[in-house]
Amino acid sequence: MILRSVLILVLLVGVLFPASQSLRFDLQSGQTKCIAEDIKSNSMTVGKYHVVKPNEDYPLPDSHKLTVRVTSSYGNNFHSAEKVENGQFAFTATEQGDYMACFWAPEHSPPITVTVDFDWRTGVHTKDWTNVAKKGQVDAMELELKNLYDTIQSIHEEMFYLREREEEMQELNKATTSKMFWLSFLSLFLCLSVAGLQFWHLKTFFEKKKLI
């Protein structure tokens, strides 16, 4: 019961206060930086990115423009952009697992540093309830109820997702234990076989020499 309560609390914290909705990072010219996000199947995900201008009074030079790719763990491409200073993507995950957003800055001499703002949201966090309230002209209570309903639904889906992952890990542990058992049995059999052959060889050798 305590473990279940702790799990629900962790899920609430994870859903209501995600670890990183938005981040800023530096990227050296000629290098690539990838960011991973674990997304379950049929979940909506959206992302926005833009390069921070080193000087607001001038347009962004080509040396600061990026090539961006978003792919799944199976190698499927969900977003692609070349030589851009900003962009966005949105899709519903068809595969469960880690999705990678990779940013590449072109080569430049001398080396430069590109600063990128990146916002990646998944699940219930993809919904902007403020805009929903403005468009639908719903009252504050209804807005809170809708937000709470989506949060509870997200927690419910997350619990089923964690249960599926736990079952996968249990199956993997069983398979690994079975393989280790047979490997140990085979190793023991080989050791006994080698010991038997050595014993037979020594016995034959001593009999030929008439030592026994």
Image (spheres, rainbow, N blue to C red):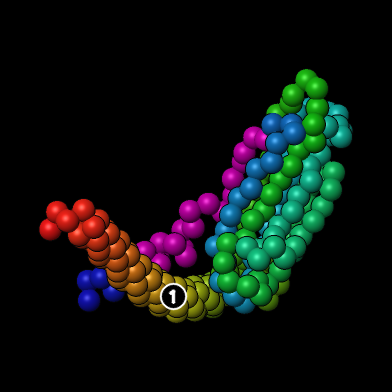
Q: Residue furthest left?
A: 212
What SS does tag 1 mark? helix
Q: Amino acid at mark 1?
A: Glu
Left or right, 163 with reference to 112: left
Coordinates of residue 48 in the picture (x, y in percent)? 70, 54
From where the camera sits, is residue 133 visible? no
From where the camera sits, is residue 167 visible? yes
Q: Which residue is mark 1?
A: 168
For the point 29% across and 63% down, the residue is 197
Check the image and report above or below for 94 versus 52: below
Q: Nearer the viewer, residue 183 or 4?
A: 183
Quadrant (top left, top right, bottom left, bottom right) of the C terminus: bottom left
Magenta span: 8-27
Left or right, 18 with reference to 171: right
In magenta segment, residue 42: no
Quadrant (top left, top right, bottom left, bottom right) of the N terminus: bottom left
Left or right, 175 with reference to 109: left
For the point 76% across and 50% down, the residue is 68
For the point 62% across and 63% down, the residue is 73
